[in-house]
Amino acid sequence: MTASEDKGVWVFGYGSLIWKVDFPIEDQKFGCITGYARRFWQKSHDHRGTEQNPGFVVTLLQLEELQKLENTDASNLESICWGMAYKIKSGHEEQVLKHLDFREKDGYTIHRVNVHSSEPSKNNPDQSVIVSNAIVYIGRTDNPSFGGPVSIQTVAKTIHKSVGPSGSNKEYLLNLCHALRSKSSNALDTHLAQLEEIILELDTTTPVSPLLSHNSIHTKV
């Protein structure tokens, strides 16, 4: 079945949705989106931090704006972001989208992306599309919880100490890295790998164990 033939509502997750799917699904596909990079630049006041001491969670930035924010050449930036696409179970779309709107309420807005099975070819980018027009939640640079640009050391130190209603910020980062590695050895972007390395250096005595049994978490319901 081609992407254009596969009807239904799909959601692309690039953060906690990769390992924490808390809504009914019919199908799931591991893939990537192009033209965006993942950064831990979205402040979290309600999940992995508090109003007084916000943590950091991931958002997506278009390469053009990230190039300006990081004052770097486009050739230095990774041009794809790996994650999971989920097809919402038929008949549950309205309920699930309301749930996701609430879950992502701290500065995120809805956008649409195509999900690819691999990095798309420049000559025929549509050939690798596995999901068309998937919903993705992005914390844009103009949202009040956007905290970037931030140095990698500052982000790591904040993640290391932050805790919120959904758990520790370290757990979020380490589970994200673990989930991506479990899908593909090439899925972990440099930004996440650098943060993981710093966090493990900061916390060698009481490391946070990643969540286990991704197969059970991703079971269709």
Image (tube, rainbow, N blue to C red):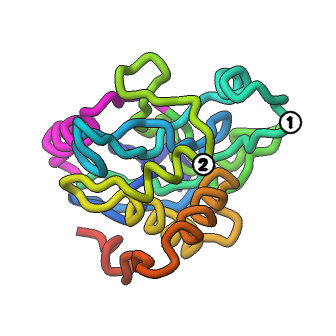
* Residue 135 drawn in magenta: no
Residue appearing at x 62%, y 39% in the figure: 151
**Mark 2 element type:** helix
Q: Quadrant of residue 35?
A: top right
**Above or below for 142 versus 98:** above
Give the residue pinned by disc 1: 75
**Mark 1 element type:** helix
Segment colored magenta: 90-112
Residue 122 image offset from top left, x and y in percent: 83, 37
Give the residue pinned by disc 2: 153
Label located before the other in sequence (2 or 1): 1
Residue 116 image offset from top left, x and y in percent: 62, 49
Q: Amino acid at mark 1?
A: Ser
Are the residues tagged 2 and 1 within 8 Å (C-beta)? Answer: no
Nearer the observer, 205 or 45 = 205
Residue appearing at x 62%, y 36% in the figure: 36
Q: Residues within 10 Å of mark 1 (few under 14, many from 20)?
A: few
Residue appearing at x 66%, y 24% in the figure: 69
The answer to whether residue 123 is seen in the rendering is no
* Front: mark 2 or 1: 2
Task: Please give the count of numbered marks on the rendered protein.
Answer: 2
